[in-house]
Image (spheres, grey):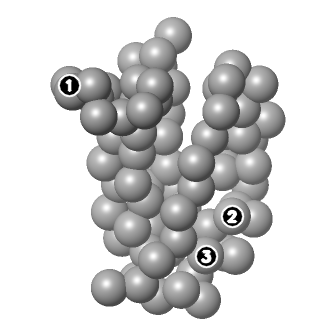
Amino acid sequence: MKTTVLNEVLALKEVIPVIKACTAGKTFTERSKGYEYGWVVELEKKEDLPVYANAQPHLDFLTKYKPLFDDVIALDYEN
């Protein structure tokens, strides 16, 4: 199941045009404060965040998988 979730989050890049890059994986250290998996979705500009957040494929992903997550940390930043 966890591999399926990772594959589906990575597949969002193919169906949501504002996603510039997407990576996901399982932690290999004990520094993750109990989190086992993580992913990063990179957007071109911060104005793309609501487009991504409200894109139907993203909403479908959340509906399908969010109930399986014990806890989630979301972090939005500019570089």
Residue where numbered disc 1 is placed: 28
Q: CA distance from mark 3 to mark 2?
A: 6 Å
Q: Rounded to the nearest whole Å, what is the CA distance between mark 2 and mark 1?
A: 28 Å
What residue is drawn where x is 39% and y is 54%?
40
How far apart marks 1 and 3 lie (CA) works out to 29 Å
Q: Which residue is mark 3?
A: 49
Label 3 neighbour load within 10 Å: few <14, some 14-19, many 20+: some
Where is residue 26? Give x, y as percent: 31, 27
Q: Amino acid at mark 1?
A: Phe
Residue sticking out furthest to the left: 28
Q: Secondary structure at mark 2?
A: helix
Foreground residue among 14 and 70: 70
Q: Residues within 10 Å of mark 2 (few under 14, many from 20)?
A: few
Residue 16 placement (x, y as % from top left): 54, 62
Closer to the chain start, of discs 2 and 1, is 1
Identify which residue is drawn at 75% across, 49% down: 59
Does residue 25 appear in the picture of this structure?
A: no
For disc 2, the marked residue is: 53
Amino acid type assigned to the residue bearing label 2 in the image: Ala
Q: Is mark 3 in CB contact (under 8 Å) with mark 2? A: yes
Residue 36 vertical position relative to residue 58 in the rendered view, above or below: above
Q: Which mark is residue 42?
A: none
> Which of the two labelled residues, at mark 1 and mark 3, occupies the earlier sequence position?
1
Image quadrant occupied by the C terminus = bottom left
